[in-house]
Image (spheres, rainbow, N blue to C red):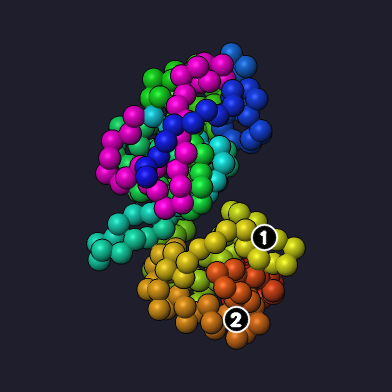
Amino acid sequence: MGRHSIEICDCNQCENKTGVFCHLSMEEKDLLSRDKGSNFYKKGQVIFYEDNHPNGLFCIYKGKVKISKFGDEGKDQIVRFANESDVLGYRALLSGDTYRGTATAMEDTYVCHISRSNFFELVGKNNNFSFEIIKLLANDLKNSEQKLVNISQKPVLERIAESLLILKERFGMNENGALKVSLTRREIGDMAGVTTETSIRTLSTLKSDGIIELVGKEIRIVNLKELVRTANLCD
């Protein structure tokens, strides 16, 4: 079964208090509420596909999403993650280009859709909103440049360790050190640009070194300081 439309609360009543839309006035949020669409995606369902043309902006109300690109060798590369309050599709809208990646729900996810016309109306009228979008673009560029350096220069162990730290920073971890997101070994490999087999072996090495624990699909960070050192992120 594909996505299906749902009703999500008025934007002024949204419980997500962070993100670019927090800089809008009540009147501007009312405009979004009147015209937005809302959809529910089950785990594994695609929100938008790479190379498709955008017709609006997506904002995650609840859930987690991965954005991946199809590589030259037929292998997916996870380029970033998104969760509550994050927006997707703004780069394609602003550039007039197609989506540069495929967005897939990592768990049951609720998403609001803002039309192209409303997005550009807000960009034109609200300087604070425009500035927040510019900051997102600048941050995307910084992360893309860093990822290119990591893939081309870092050893596999460092890349996998840094991938775990990215997941910790993005989604957090529980009191027992478990990451608050569930990824397959293949997805972790897709983050680091390595095969599933290499991902499995490297995670086992981190486990043997007492840096992480593997409990089913759960990954627990038991020695954060050593994980940072292994990722070669120390000053």
Identify the residue shown where x is 52% and y is 28%.
Answer: 7
Local secondary structure at mark 1: loop
Q: In this view, does 45 lie above or below 154?
A: above
**Where is mark 2, residue-wise?**
207
Nearer to me, 20 or 184: 184
Residue name at image x 69 percent, y 67 percent: 177
Asked if residue 81 can be seen in this view, the reply is no
Q: Is residue 195 visible?
A: yes
Which residue is drawn at the image coordinates 60% and 70% (left, top)?
A: 219
* Image quadrant occupied by the N terminus: top left
How busy is the neighbourhood of tag 1: few (under 14 within 10 Å), some, or many (20 plus)?
A: some
Work out which quarter of the rendered image holds the C terminus and state it: bottom right
Residue 208 x %, y %: 60, 86
Tell me if residue 30 comes above or below residue 66 in the rendering.
above
Residue 114: % across, % down: 45, 27
For disc 1, the marked residue is: 173
Residue 19 in percent (x, y) is at 59, 35
Q: How crowded is mark 2: few (under 14 residues within 10 Å), some or many (20 or more)?
A: some
The numbered disc on residue 127 is: none
Query: Could you tell me residue 80's position as x and y percent?
Result: 46, 53
Element type where label 2 sits in the image = helix
Q: How far apart are marks 1 and 2 (CA)?
A: 17 Å
Type of amino acid under label 1:
Met
Quadrant of residue 18 in the image?
top right
The reply to whether the magenta stretch includes residue 30 is: yes
Q: Which residue is at the front of the view, 82 or 143?
A: 82
Q: Hey, which residue is sitting farthest front in the picture? A: 1
Residue numbers of the magenta segment:
29-55
